[in-house]
Amino acid sequence: MATQTIDDLPTPALILDRAILRRNLKRMSERLSKAGVMLRPHLKTAKSVQIGRMAVEGHDGRITVSTLAEARYFAEGGFTDILYGVSVVPSKLAAVTEIRRKGVNLRVVTDNLDVARAIAAAAKDGDTFSVLIEIDSGAGRAGLPWPALPGLLDIARVLHQAPGVDLAGLMTHAGQSYHQNTPDGIAAVAEQERLAITGAAEKLRAAGIPCPIVSAGSTPTAMHSKNFSGITEMRPGVYVFNDLDQELIGSCGAGDLALSVLASVIGHYPHRNQMLIDAGALALSKDISAQEFQPKVGYGTIVDAPAKDMAVVACSQEHGFVGSDDPIPYGTMPVGTRVRVLPNHACITASAYDRYYVVDSDLDGGKSVVDVYDRINGW
Amino acid sequence: MATQTIDDLPTPALILDRAILRRNLKRMSERLSKAGVMLRPHLKTAKSVQIGRMAVEGHDGRITVSTLAEARYFAEGGFTDILYGVSVVPSKLAAVTEIRRKGVNLRVVTDNLDVARAIAAAAKDGDTFSVLIEIDSGAGRAGLPWPALPGLLDIARVLHQAPGVDLAGLMTHAGQSYHQNTPDGIAAVAEQERLAITGAAEKLRAAGIPCPIVSAGSTPTAMHSKNFSGITEMRPGVYVFNDLDQELIGSCGAGDLALSVLASVIGHYPHRNQMLIDAGALALSKDISAQEFQPKVGYGTIVDAPAKDMAVVACSQEHGFVGSDDPIPYGTMPVGTRVRVLPNHACITASAYDRYYVVDSDLDGGKSVVDVYDRINGW
């Protein structure tokens, strides 16, 4: 069979540039190795065993996931130290135990005293748990809000004293870093993240409770932090692919976006200077996070566009509306022409697909499909 | 095995109330039967053979789909008259032919002369096509814009004269009806939709070209149209489930929402009067269409909420932030409590799931899982 190229693929399809992926992985891996911090990549973005294996190369293999479906999938893929990074609830402990019984150290997270007690009660008959307590370092999402850290010692004591429970440490995620768009602004958030999590760790240790893991990180703070002192591991996720949002906030450069959606032009509408493509709300997602810093990116920008600021300006379920500040050159983009769209938010866009068609821009400009990686979706 | 209830399900999960589904299907079925119009439900919303079969009960079985994956799935499910309602491109004709060779009349849509010629050229050796030309009745999406209808007769003649090609008729979708929120406003859009598609049909017939199918419809226009004269079939889709957007524009009542997302409370944040649930951007989607008429719906409202205007006010990938205008009664909603979230836009929310857990509020208030319906996603 002749080599398959992206021109042979059905559209819409999810395209991953392996050359860019490798550079992104190498950059973060080297940065954290040099800083003396362990890398626990958050695989909620990639959701792919093949990419996960590449991400932990040269590291000890610890990873983060966001769903039990990911936990099962990566456990089957041979990963043995997995942090399930979304607050666990008692009804999910049986599923956690099922995975742990296979010899996988699936660790869970909580910020709640009742849940800590439920974990303590569920640890019996040889079924153990490893738990991290979540700290809110300013994102205003999950975690005990720093600096008050209400209830931290109560939760920690329940877990620390429970037979069969390993209080492995603390974790935080400075999601507020996504709303900074200068290296200094992000570095300031990174320092806030560090002060919060190391301050909480000191509070535990002062109470005689060990805190071996001090886990922080987002892609922006991992890229721009000036001081990792006291942090033992970082959990960046979207850096594997990057996207328009990461580019606009300055986590990466314009050439570092590894993921795109391949689409076909399906209609010409010169009376309103628009085209339609077959990538709409499902193929791109309705995430518009990158519009915070550049409204013109719409639902995604067109790669190598022949006209200025060509982007998907609106979406219905299977239709993407492409507009431009220039007149669209319809003659050079007949119906059937293939375009690639850079997503606002790679984690959300990728979730519509069950596979990556892998190309390599270092080999032939990214024309041939050199591999197919699978993905796990759902819960 | 004991009956499974929604308390036994993993969260997040997609819950479908069969009693409401049946009422929604019956209402539309009876309305169009009474109006003497064929029903060709758009199954891009349900994407489920079980629901498709219920939707066409008492009708001739014609349906609409939005992807080739749906076309294959419904063809395998026994449906034999399928309109693929998104503009086809030449590279997809081979896949269309493959399905048609199995005895399924998979019809395609175009608004482009080059595509019409490609269809004519591809019809050979016994491989036929059935084509509808799309008209833009004011939505500003796909279709030849009415009233100018540029190129309509050129496209129609290519298709009409091509051996092996059946020019089956015309179709339109008045998507602008989603931005009206009164019965009269929607009825006015419905009349515009009717005038456009019947006017285009008259133009064909005046040129000696038959136009047997005159296909229109959206859920709002199907519900509020006062005159179907000249229209042969309607293609509503979201009416099967309805959602907050349809409720707010008046396509349905508050008791007509059949779909919800089951989620668990995973954290309490009294310092900011919020809770977190395990349904975030992937489980709910980032569609905020219903906010056009009621910003307080956020990313979805909580069913039977114990506090005022309780809704998902923000989302990250796996976290939904629940807020309320009242103080949240944390004592009655401990971590682990299950809540149901009504989606903004059922078609987009459902796309994250591979199955519906079916309950029936007429049987036991919707507690027991009475069935599981599958779904086809992707392309």
Image (cartoon, coloured by chain):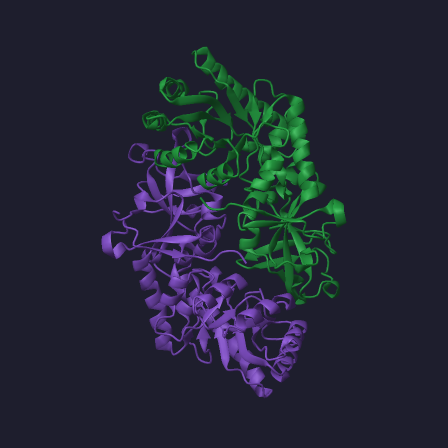
Chain colours: A purple, B green
- Check the image and report above or below for B146 versus A187: above
Residue B354 relative to residue A325: left or right:
right
Give percent across and percent down for residue B130: 43, 26
Q: Residue drawn 50% across and 48% down? A: A286
- Check the image and report above or below for B354 versus A43: above
- Check the image and report above or below for A375 versus A83: above
Q: Residue drawn 69% across and 62% down? A: B337
Q: Is residue B184 visible?
A: no
- Check the image and report above or below for B14 versus B60: below
Give percent across and percent down for residue A231: 46, 78
Q: Is residue B162 visible?
A: yes
| Image quadrant containing the C terminus of chain B | top left
Residue A108, image quadrant: bottom right
Residue situated in front as seen by the camera: A123 or B315? A123
Residue B257, image quadrant: top right
Give percent across and percent down for residue B28: 65, 31
The number of discs equals 0
Residue A45 relative to residue B24: left or right:
left
| Image quadrant containing the N terminus of chain B | bottom right
Q: Residue drawn 36% across and 68% down? A: A28
